[in-house]
Image: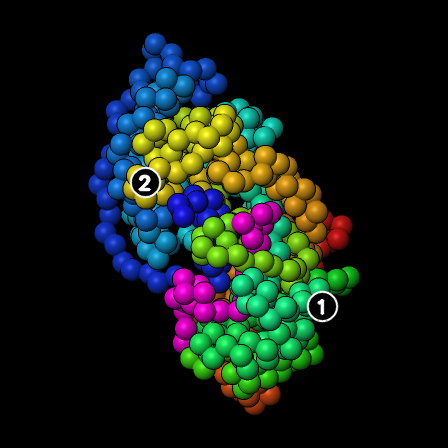
Amino acid sequence: MSKKKKHFSLLLTTLLTVSLALSACGGNNSKNAGGEAASGGNKATESTEKPVELIWYTIGPPQKDMDKVLAEVNKYTLEKINATLDIKMLDFGDYTQKMQVMAASGEPMDILFTSSWAFDYVQNARKGAFLELDELLKNQGKGIVDTIDPAFLEGSKVDGHNYAIPANKELPAQEVFRFNKELLDKYKLDLTSVKTMADLEPLLKTIKENEPGVTPYAMVKDFMPIMPFDYVIEKMPMAVYMDTKDYKVVNILETPELKEALKTVRKFYQAGYISSEVATTSSVDDLYKAGKWFTDRASTQPLADNLWSASYGYPVVSTPASKPYIYNWSVMGSMQAISANSEYPEKAMEFLNLLNTDPKLRNMIDSGIEGVHYEKVSDNMIKNLPDAKNYDMPTFSLGNIMINYLNEGDPENKWEEFKKFNDAGINAPLLGFNFDTSKVTNEIAAVQNVKEEFWAPLMTGSVDSEEYLTKANEKLKAAGLDKIIAEAQTQIDAWKAANNK
């Protein structure tokens, strides 16, 4: 079965929960091609304007056929906006650290990928790494404003301003329990009663007793139970309740909801439903490839079951585990910024405007060259050719996905389903609030160190939760957790008052 490029829009699911392995890097000395600053108009080529080369750093494994595709892309962009691209890809595990080094050294770049989970958007916007885009959006980015869901631009503002263009994709984040359908069918197991993690127990018991070679619940060390919280900092223990009225920041480790959830995870661990090595397991891809798993949890999007089934080669089905909430991190999950050091900011915005509004350009950068990497099945549907493996870009990272071609087998109403999903999203209480950590930098680093010691064994049920919660809380408070919570509360109270929450 041919690989679907749209799988990559779900790759974010995993990356949001995996600590990236970072490696150091030196600079790259390529320069912008000569030429004077672009006039910033929306016209195509002007005879008096010299062509501009835009340097674009983006995330993902370097592609074998990048030069071949770029040659075609640049013919098109030269004609449309009198600019060419130099696309430089940095792999997922390297991206954050390499970009931090290059941005700090003033490395030439015009456009760069940023997000809530890689090369942190809010932090780098506040540090001055990105250009404020408000005026550029009004002038060279009108197509973007008219095209993408307004919630993306509004929800990604930092201190009232836009510093990057979010990808127009799924807006909310919704968790689901996924299942290997072959095992569901084999034992005639019913999903209708599964609403919470605790509801999984009778199904897991059946698999454990009858399938000795199968892991009933596929879990990794970064697992965290679904909680009714909106986190001040993702994966840190400071949060407000989803149904909050007073916006009180709590230490989640002291809440009855977390204590109860950890009892369930511990029960599953002791029953053998979860691998005994879960606290040190960073990937369960081998289980997925072999079909040796029964259930797990993942973030979803419209038609996700089709994507997972195509990816694994056997049917996967899912059922909701949470409501579709719109968080800061889901709005900021994939963005393109313009470097504060860009020589050609107007031209960079012209390109981003084209990328997000022109289906021909968007699909060329995403899927490669027609007749080489894919063939058209119909006007808006494609099928991958064998050479697609040489150009397999991470779709979610490249702008507006809703002007992409459909993959063979996708329903015609795919993008309408995405829009319905986005419209159904519920704003999380802290949407639009960005915590300024400058006054508690040392405390956050200390709390992070303590968290690394306790989090994985505690959240995966590998240790007695009552005993470990007490130890973890003592150490977290000694590291400065209460000071972080107090600072967060002060900022949230001010934000709440300013926004009439």
Q: Residue at x 54, y 63 (%)?
A: 182
The numbered dot on residue 386 is 2
Q: Residue at x 49, y 32 (%)?
A: 381
Indicate the amino acid at tag 2.
Answer: Pro
C-alpha separation, residue under disc 1 versus residue under disc 2 = 43 Å
Establish if 262 lies above or below 364.
below
The residue nearer to you, when weighing 324 against 132, is 324
Image location (x, y in percent) of residue 248: 71, 67
Indicate the amino acid at tag 1.
Answer: Ser
Q: Is residue 176 left or right of residue 129?
A: right
The span picked out in magenta is 279-306
Image location (x, y in percent) of residue 405: 49, 33
Q: Do labels 1 and 2 touch, CB within 8 Å? A: no
Q: Residue at x 53, y 24 (%)?
A: 139
Neighbor class of circle 2 (other Cα within 10 Å; few <14, some 14-19, many 20+) is few
Which type of secondary structure does the marked residue at label 2 adopt?
Answer: helix
> Which residue corresponds to mark 1?
193
Q: Is residue 373 left or right of residue 201?
A: left
Neighbor class of circle 1 (other Cα within 10 Å; few <14, some 14-19, many 20+) is few
Decide if residue 286 is in sight here.
yes
The residue nearer to you, when weighing 396 against 58, is 396
Image location (x, y in percent) of residue 376: 43, 29
Quarter-of-image position of residue 234: bottom right
Establish if 141 lies above or below 47.
below
Which type of secondary structure does the marked residue at label 1 adopt?
Answer: loop
